[in-house]
Image (cartoon, rainbow, N blue to C red):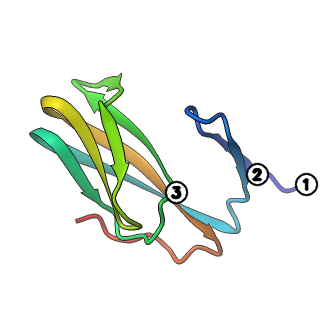
Amino acid sequence: MDLKQLYKNVITGESILLDPKESTMCPYSEIFTPLTDWVVTHNNDTMLIVMQVFVNDILVDPDEVVINDGNTFTVKFGVPTAGRVNFLVYNGIGGNGCGVVD
């Protein structure tokens, strides 16, 4: 039996079942100084991203997240905020490997 991983979009409730042998999930973490917009560049040419945002090591919901294009997204806050974003980028079946975060 092949094991697969189930991921769920907590906003839409949609689920995706992935075979880790056939897909690439690239994990990243980036730390930010106080800014209202955290612009993250992952260079993976995909808009399939799962993320968590932490402020003072507490999981928080940002005001907004904007997927700018296949290589960048922006985490937005109402006031300048320092913290960390952990994220996974899904590169699809037979993924082309992980890009480099700028």
Determine the CA span between mark 1 and mark 3.
Answer: 27 Å
**Which one is closest to the eye, mark 1 or mark 3?**
3
Between 28 and 78, the one lying in front of the other is 78
The residue at 70%/68% (across/down) is 22
Q: Which residue is mark 1?
A: 1
Is the N terminus in the top left, top right, bottom left or bottom right quadrant?
A: bottom right
Q: Which residue is mark 3?
A: 48
Q: Which residue is mark 2?
A: 4
Query: Could you tell me residue 79's position as x and y percent?
Result: 12, 28
Which mark sits nearer the N-terminus, 3 or 2? 2
Is the C terminus in the top left, top right, bottom left or bottom right quadrant?
A: bottom left
Between 100 and 48, the one lying in front of the other is 48
The residue at 41%/67% (across/down) is 70
Determine the CA span between mark 1 and mark 2.
Answer: 10 Å
Q: What's the residue type where badge 3 is placed?
A: Leu
Which mark sits nearer the N-terminus, 1 or 3? 1
**Which one is closest to the eye, mark 1 or mark 2?**
2
